């Protein structure tokens, strides 16, 4: 990293509020937090849905697959999914993702879920998936394209086989890379721009040191790369594991003092529970259930409002937020 780059990063760190957000634009982060906490919408602008729990990998920076994570698993019933989509379609939702704490391509009906959302949601609503790409066969890719998926994000933590398979445990480097390249070819053969394809990495120590190399690799293949902030997913157990492995770029992780998530995003598990955020892997903060209430009712009910008030006051002792830290 050059001296100029180091200085720029230092300035960004001073100006950017300590937040779990992936944004790297200090002014935008400040403005977003101020606006959403002052003018919280009456319905979430972003909705994420777990249609099938679980993952086929156990990445070192993720609680999924770890022995300390003990949660129930299952598939979201069609009627529940349709209820969520139908209600969201009547409101101003900017982005809807049939994905939450899971590998979405494990759901054999994911293309049907995407197609239903596309048929109901306003045209401006982006339908997005985040996947590790291991199950992105040509058939699956074809179905997602024809379902109308707007954006597909693939998590690939390294272009080096040994590092990739040690970091994204359970996956095979050659298979994932082959899937991504064939998907690019499939899009070209069909003459379609959607879904927009993007590669994501999490900024572990390794990624920080190799970021320039990885950016050049994906740029040569016409694919965008985004390196997202590393945090502890509100899990002290995960943080201890990453720290022992040397994955953390620095040792000055602190509590995330600014967070806009409960002010504009909704997260719904396969059981219909609305949880506080994507870091609530233990599903410890259930704010309501979609079988019993609507999204709008839960979003505006006392538990959500009280949680937002406590966050604004910095009173997070005993809450999930107390353990959320590690954003650089």
Image: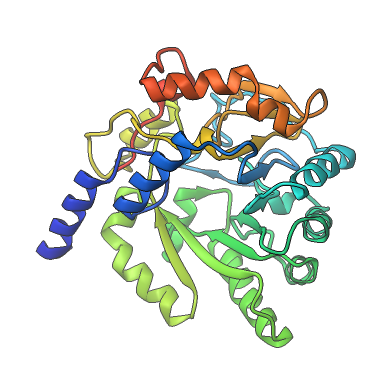
The structure residue drawn at horizontal position 74% and vertical position 59%, both measured from the top left corner, is 122
Report the colour scheme: rainbow
Please give the name of the residue rendered at 78% of the width and 41% of the height, measured from the top-left corner. Answer: 84
Q: Residue at x 34, y 40 (%)?
A: 327
Q: Quadrant of the N terminus?
A: bottom left
> Please, which residue is most extreme toward the right here?
79
User: At which x and y percent is residue 189?
Assistant: 70, 87
Quadrant the C terminus occupies: top left
- In the displayed structure image, the side of residue 98 where residue 164 appears, left or right: left
Is residue 109 rendered to the left or right of residue 63?
A: right
- In this view of the protein, can residue 177 be seen by the observer? yes
Outermost residue toward the front?
A: 39
Which quadrant of the figure has residue 145?
Answer: bottom right
Using the image, determine if residue 150 lies above or below residue 320: below
Q: Position of residue 125 (x, y in %)?
A: 67, 58
Residue 159 vertical placement versus 273 (above, below):
below
Is 196 drawn above or below residue 92 in the view shown? Answer: below
Q: Position of residue 292 (x, y in %)?
A: 81, 23
Residue drawn at point x = 83 percent, y = 56 percent: 116
Residue 284 rendering spot, x and y as whole percentages: 58, 20
Query: Is residue 72 or residue 316 the one in the foreground?
Result: 316
From the viewer's side, name the closer residue of 320 and 106.
Answer: 320
- Name the residue at the top extreme: 318
Compared with residue 103, is residue 218 higher up or lower down, i.e. above or below?
Answer: below
Residue in the foreground of this view, choosing between 120 and 100: 120
Q: Is residue 311 left or right of residue 264?
A: left
């Amino acid at each position: 990293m050059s001296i100029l780059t180091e200085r720029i990063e230092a300035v960004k760190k001073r100006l950017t509020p300590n937040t779990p957000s992936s944004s790297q634009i200090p002014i935008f982060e400040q403005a977003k937090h101020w606006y959403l906490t002052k003018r919280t919408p009456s319905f979430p602008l972003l909705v994420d849905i777990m249609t099938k729990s679980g993952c086929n990998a156990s990445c070192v920076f993720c609680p999924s697959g770890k022995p300390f994570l003990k949660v129930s698993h299952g598939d979201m019933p069609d009627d529940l999914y349709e209820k969520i989509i139908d209600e969201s379609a009547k409101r101003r939702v900017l982005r809807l993702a049939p994905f939450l704490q899971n590998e979405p391509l494990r759901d054999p009906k994911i293309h049907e879920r995407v197609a239903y959302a596309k048929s109901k949601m306003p045209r401006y609503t982006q339908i997005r998936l985040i996947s590790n790409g291991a199950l992105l066969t040509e058939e699956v890719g074809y179905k997602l394209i024809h379902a109308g998926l707007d954006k597909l994000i693939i998590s690939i933590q390294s272009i080096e086989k040994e590092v990739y398979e040690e970091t994204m445990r359970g996956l095979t480097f050659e298979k994932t890379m082959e899937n991504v390249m064939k998907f690019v070819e499939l899009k070209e053969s069909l003459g379609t721009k959607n879904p927009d394809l993007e590669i994501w990495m999490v900024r572990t120590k390794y990624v920080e040191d190799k970021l320039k190399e990885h950016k050049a690799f994906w740029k040569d293949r016409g694919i965008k790369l985004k390196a997202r902030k590393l945090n502890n997913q509100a899990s002290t157990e995960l943080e201890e594991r990453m720290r022992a492995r040397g994955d953390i770029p620095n040792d000055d992780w602190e509590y995330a003092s600014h967070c806009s998530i409960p002010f504009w995003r909704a997260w719904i598990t396969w059981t219909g529970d609305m949880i506080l955020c994507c870091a609530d892997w233990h599903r410890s903060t259930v704010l309501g259930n979609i079988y019993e209430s609507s999204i709008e009712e839960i979003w505006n009910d006392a538990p959500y409002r009280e949680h937002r008030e406590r966050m604004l006051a910095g009173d997070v002792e005993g809450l999930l937020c107390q353990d959320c830290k590690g954003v650089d």
